[in-house]
Amino acid sequence: MKKNELVQKSYEIAKERYQTVGVDVEKALEDLQKISVSIHCWQADDVTGFENLGNLGGGGIQATGNYPGKARNIDEIRQDIEKVLTLVGGSHRLNLHAIYGDFEGKVVDRDEVEASHFTSWMEWAKEKELKLDFNSTSFGHPKSGDLTLANPNKEIRDFWIEHTKRCRAISEEMGKFQNDPCIMNLWIHDGMKDLTVNRYEYRKILEQSLDEIFATEYKNMKDCLESKLFGIGLESYTVGSHDFYLGYGAKKQKIVTLDTGHFHLTESVADKISSLLLFTPEIMLHVSRPIRWDSDHVTILNDDVTDLAKEIVRANALNRVHIGLDYFDASINRLGAYVIGICATQKAFLQGLLEPIAQLRKYEENGQYFERLALLEEAKVLPWNAVWDMFCLKNNIAIGEDYIAEVQQYEKEVTSKR
């Protein structure tokens, strides 16, 4: 029996099995098809970018490894992303950092970036049926240091304020061009390596900088603010902490970004979803995998990611939560890292969509907590993988482990020759 026939047969059996617990599998597949993952461009080139200033690193950004085949220019990144899109199902977005502009070999400092530097990205994305998201870039610059938007030095602070204002304007043009809001994420590494006595002052400065940045209102972009637990070399104090941005986001009605690698390893990011939804308009996710620290390992299908996806589905919040990836592993095939992470995230949401939530809610409302726990456990082993295979079949992409050979072939024909 051919693989496609096996997939179809397994799917029909899975569909019947899910019907016994009140789950509409066809509806789950339809909903999964609509979930867009914002694919991060920086996995392709280890967060290097194209600005010709000489990326200095720092700010907690560190890609480890030297696997051959790294994208070296804008054409190679686009080539890699195009290949990734042939290996994953669904309709997705592409997330750009400001250092990835089409600068045509010219030196363009960060307070000089304009929408024109991203026109070719917009046109390319439209051709590939992708929507774009955007990020300001505060790291890897001579003026980065330990403090950017929270810097008491007005000259440095104004430089970064101007950069961020320009990034918002670029995002507005992207949103207008694609007729869909561009999500503009603001993350800064600002902090101190050792003890500081001016915690309040730096946060007050940051608040004032943000107020100035957000003074102009736009209709075609959405602002979000990303916190951090700590950065490499800035371990003792982070100005833009979760508490800071949660307070600012609730007060100013801005989107708060939850990066799954930016919290203590014993914290549940899933548990934060319901609280943020009550007080902020929307949520942005950066799905990553921390190992002991914010190490940005490739996202895999683990309990943390699955719990996160299930909580979003349970809260009926798919229309208020934006899903993006944020990791950079230079120790393995970069293209393969993309596919693993995207598919792992989609699989987690599929499990959430296939959860017998109606029956689980009835048990909870009736105080039947044994029954609730029992069904939660049994739901883990329902044949969701057969439904996933059908998702792949419907999207005409590699089923199961078949994508490994395609990645290997692309490496042999393309990336190994770079």
Image (cartoon, rainbow, N blue to C red):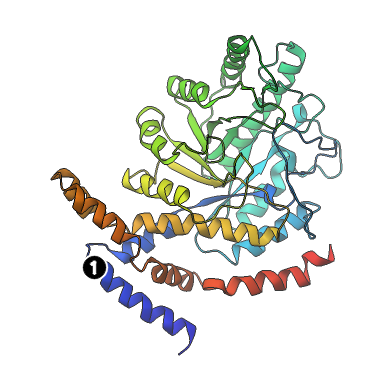
Percent coordinates x, y for residue 194 in the rendering: 69, 19
14 with respect to 212 (left or right): left
Q: Name the quadrant containing residue 365.
A: top left
> In front here: 191 or 32?
191
Q: Against 297, is 51 above or below?
A: above
Residue drawn at 20 percent across, 47 percent down: 369
> In front here: 158 or 249?
249
| Amino acid at pointer 1 | Gln
Percent coordinates x, y for residue 124 in the rendering: 67, 54
Percent coordinates x, y for residue 397 in the rendering: 54, 71
Q: Name the quadrant containing residue 96.
A: top right
Local secondary structure at mark 1: helix
369 with respect to 202 (left or right): left
Residue at the extreme bottom: 1
Q: Against 132, is 78 above or below?
A: below
Q: Is residue 299 visible?
A: yes
**Can you identify the residue that label 1 sits on?**
19
Disc 1 crowd rating (10 Å Cα; few below 14, some 14-19, many 20+) is few
Residue at the extreme left: 366
Q: Against 2, is 136 above or below?
A: above
Percent coordinates x, y for residue 325 in the rendering: 57, 47
